[in-house]
Image (cartoon, rainbow, N blue to C red):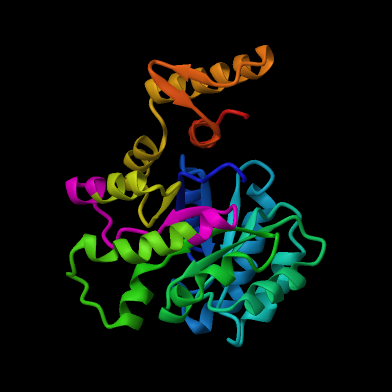
Amino acid sequence: MSSPCRVALVAPASDDRKARKALASDADVVVLDLEDAVLPADKDSAREAAAALIREFGGDRPVSVRINALGTAWADDDLATCAALDTLQSIVLPKAETPAQIVAVDRALGDSAATISALIETAIGVRDVDTIAAAAPRLESLIIGYADLAADLGRSATISRSAWEPIQDRVLIAARAAGLTVTDGPHLTIADDDDYRTTKIRVRDLGFDGTWVIHPQQIASALAIFTPDDDAIRDAERVLEALEQAADTGAGAASLDGRMLDEALAVAARRTLRKAGKDV
């Protein structure tokens, strides 16, 4: 599994000021958007702008592109442009619904090193998320897109956060079973307030690796929430040290602070250290 992205900041590729501000931020990844944030008349110029920004910044920081959905008039050109960008980290595929879509994007990328992230934001996508997650080795991450998913399901924008837990669990389980990272969708407000922080803490505790954000002022809180603290890092290191020592000495079991250690705890410890930016 690759190192999880804690915070991905989304910015419209058509707005140079916002895009450059995003690229100068502390977000782990910047997603240049060619889809929802761009008017149809601006699609071609936004694509050109995204390519220019990736050539300028992609060598120094991770940059991704959210392309237009497959089947639209712009998707093929989006994919061709992205495939030619040597420093593009990943493509985000909106409205992912079938394994065939993932395979098509994979083929279109050719020899590019870019990975794929799939946005699960339709009822069909949720229903078939297990097969989507296993579609291609280049697929790296699943992301929940709440706005489009709520519209597709007919859900109210004021529904309680807990109503999303069955879908969050379904996407999370599919991602983990396929060895993928899993990212929460953006909170649909720009405020860094108690509601935002409480929501992100809850999805972190469910097992999500990180979140998309739609405003730079949310980055600091998201980074703090999805980055393990010093105590968690040290505990993870001690778990792995104890297991390594037990293996070196031929001990049949390892324990630490009254806990029996096994591979499940090792997996959790490695994930904690990856979130903290440490090599494991």
- Residue 91 lies, in percent from the top left, at 62, 63
Residue farthest along the top direction in this orientation: 249
Taking the image as shown, residue 235 lies to the left or right of residue 106, namely: left
Q: Can residue 31 be seen in this snapshot?
A: no
- Residue 120 lies, in percent from the top left, at 47, 70
Q: Which residues are magenta?
A: 174-198
Which of the two residues, 32 or 144, is positioned nearer the viewer here?
144
Compared to 250, does 144 lie above or below?
below
At 66% across and 62% down in the image, what residue appears?
A: 51
Compared to 90, does 7 lie above or below?
above
- Residue 232 lies, in percent from the top left, at 40, 25
> Which quadrant would the C terminus be assigned to in this image?
top right
Which of the two residues, 253 or 218, is positioned nearer the viewer here?
253
* Image label count: 0
At 47% across and 18% down in the image, what residue appears?
A: 255
Tell me which corner region of the image, top left, top right, bottom left or bottom right, holds residue 102: bottom right
Residue farthest along the right direction in this orientation: 111
- Residue 32 lies, in percent from the top left, at 53, 61
Which of the two residues, 8 or 228, is positioned nearer the viewer here?
228
Compared to 140, does 78 lie above or below?
below
Tell me which corner region of the image, top left, top right, bottom left or bottom right, holds residue 109: bottom right
Taking the image as shown, residue 204 lies to the left or right of residue 16, namely: left
Asked if residue 197 lies in the magenta stretch, the reply is: yes
Asked if residue 61 lies in the magenta stretch, the reply is: no
Which of the two residues, 107 or 13, is positioned nearer the viewer here?
107
Q: Can residue 186 be seen in this snapshot?
A: yes
At 35% across and 35% down in the image, what residue appears?
A: 224
